[in-house]
Image: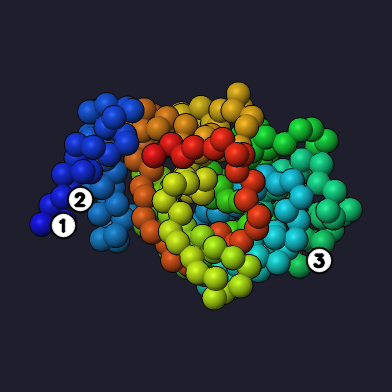
Amino acid sequence: MKKLKRLAWFLFKSPQRKLVGWSSLFTDVRGICNLLWNCLGFRHKHTQEIWVCTGLLNRSQHYLDVLLPSLMEARKHGARIALSIADCGSTDNPDLEAAIKAKWDGTLVFSSVQEPFARSRCFNRAIRQARGELLFICDADMSVPASLDKLLQRYVGTYLAWAPVCRKMLGPNPGDGWKYQSEGTGILACNRKHLERSGMLDERITTWGGEDWDLFFRLYRAGIMPLRTRCRNLVHHYHPSLKPADFKPVF
């Protein structure tokens, strides 16, 4: 009965039905077929680099201590990874590029621009300066699974993108607990053409939050299913909340 209720919710009440329309059902069916095709092994394994695109402001230590080591571990498991970083005038590390290069011997594209931080604008810069087609949009305060390459083999396709649900740590210590962060879609893996077709992140959104859900629904309008799956080893590490006092989640 519980599974039937979930199916009914997915078919009739999921956010894409309400905000995009019934055309999103066809997009979902096509995306699920794409997923099955990948899972059955009919898709040739990609040899592309995964371009990890990050925009940041004063998250240097998170990048160096959390995200970068997890990407290095994913490389040990066979992933080909390149980094695209768009800094927005961070002051917490006087030479972040050199600090990254001291640990990372792979491809790195780094830019720093003194401008007011807006996540949409900063991440779009990281995306544009990336030199590959397979993109993984990821915040600096995340750690990624060692199996990142295999996950992208499965969840990215011609009609399929991946908007995983990460684990959010609720405090600075492991014993403080965690929850799945279903309210956010800020982490995204897709082909570059998906983003170009959907129009990238909306740079008119300059306040905290909202640009990720906006892109989520525009992917649907472009005929791409941004698949939501829980990923236990994709972890959002604790830091004090940046949410404004009047913040309200989309759902």
Residue tagged 2? 6
Residue 142 spot, x, y in % from top left: 59, 59
The disc label shown at residue 102, or none: 3
Is 235 displayed left or right of 230 in the figure? right
In which image quadrant can residue 208 be found? top right
Q: Looking at the image, do the residues carrying marks 2 and 1 touch, with CB atoms under 8 Å apart?
A: yes
**Distance between the Cα atoms at labels 2 and 1?**
6 Å
N-terminal-most mark, 2 or 3? 2
In the displayed orientation, state which residue is furthest to the bottom. Answer: 175
Circle 2 SS class: helix
Residue tagged 1? 2
Residue 18 spot, x, y in % from top left: 29, 29
What amino acid is found at the position of numbered circle 1 in the picture? Lys
Circle 3 SS class: loop
**Nearer the viewer's eye, disc 2 or disc 3?**
2
In the displayed orientation, state which residue is furthest to the front. Answer: 245
In the displayed orientation, state which residue is furthest to the right. Answer: 94
